[in-house]
Amino acid sequence: METTEKKKRVLSMVQPTGTFTIGNYFGALKNFAALQDEYECVYAMADLHAITVRQEPKQLRENVYKSYALTLACGIDLDKSILFLQSQVPEHSQLAWILNCYTQFGELSRMTQFKDKSAKHADNINAGLFTYPCLMAADILLYQADYVPIGADQKQHLELTRNIAERFNGVYSPTFTVPDGIIPKNGARVMSLADPTKKMSKSDDNVNSFITLLDPRDTIIKKFKRAVTDSEACVRFAEGKDGINNLMGIYSAATGKTMEEIEAEFAGKGYGDFKVAVGETVADVLAPIQEKFAELYADKKYLEKCFAENAEKAHYIARKTVSKVMRKIGYINL
């Protein structure tokens, strides 16, 4: 009798910031949809992580609805994947506390993200900011994920998650799947349009430095026209041409073209033509996402139905892991 090989499980979560940038899209969200056919995908809005920085309650709620609708609009199919709200599955907080007790103070104090965020939010260096990686480890280990899509800035957190899993497995016998990182084949690292040495971020003070998925077409083209380049006026990928390299990377992510193909396409043309082409192409890619988002966002009842159904699916998997963990530690389960 023929058996179907079980798909490996992928886990990825995004912070609900409301409106994602094209950096979030080309770097992660676009690939979420691409992974669905090959893997069993568990996705979530990391709304528990969001409160390490003080949030305005009404705005946080709005951001969760927006982010969820946008993630669906980017191609998540709820018949293939789970997409839930982290705060609606209490096992995340429960396992995070347990893993706090299997993580060393020194390990957490070495996390570069803690240092960066502490410097940025010096008036609110809270304990959650420090123990954030334990919650992140709980997020992954709860679902026995085989793979976690990661960017370069998340390698340290994944390494800590692996260490925690191996430590717990060593003490109590195999309990957690030790996850591996996967770098998505088409994941692009998108930099600021105003300062191409920095990652694109919606929290940048300069609104011309980033493009959100909901920016109108004219705004997108205007922002690309203002993008920082260099004085050479030749579209080629080379060291020292950070601005053009960034624009070429974005154009490549939007069209699937290689750097060589882009260089050939714009041979003899100036930066003005290239910037307009990048802007128009990105606007074309975002148009169907914006249309789908508007439809989803207008139907809060549908989104709430999705929240409930997907939280239940996530809870079913998470509960099994927590029960096993508690039994091994010596707790008496309900």
Image (cartoon, grey):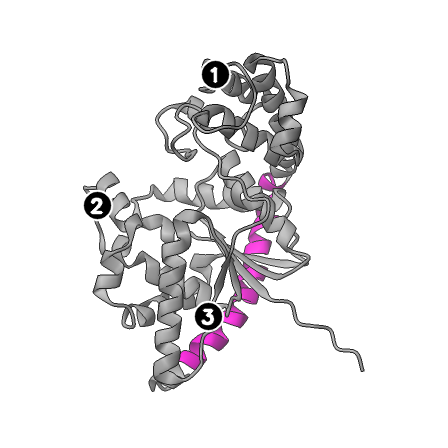
What residue do we see at 63% from left, 27% from top? 262
Residue 124's tag is: 2
Residue at which label 1 appears: 226
What residue do we see at 45% from left, 27% from top? 242
Q: Nearer the viewer, residue 119 or 311?
A: 119
Residue 178's tag is: 3
Looking at the picture, does residue 262 appear above or below residue 139?
above
Amino acid marked by disc 2: Asn
Q: Nearer the viewer, mark 2 or mark 1?
A: 1
> Residue 283's x, y, as percent?
61, 26
Amino acid marked by disc 1: Arg
Q: CA distance from mark 2 to mark 1?
A: 35 Å
What is the magenta range?
296-325
Is residue 298 rendered magenta in the image?
Answer: yes
Secondary structure, mark 1, is loop
Looking at the picture, does residue 140 appear above or below residue 170?
above
Q: Nearer the viewer, mark 3 or mark 2?
A: 3
Q: Main secondary structure of the magenta part?
A: helix
Mark 3 and mark 1 lie on one chain; the one further toward the N terminus is: 3
Question: Left or right: 38 with respect to 222?
Answer: right
- Asked whether residue 255 is in view, the answer is yes
What residue do we see at 21% from left, 45% from top? 124
Q: CA distance from mark 3 to mark 2?
A: 33 Å
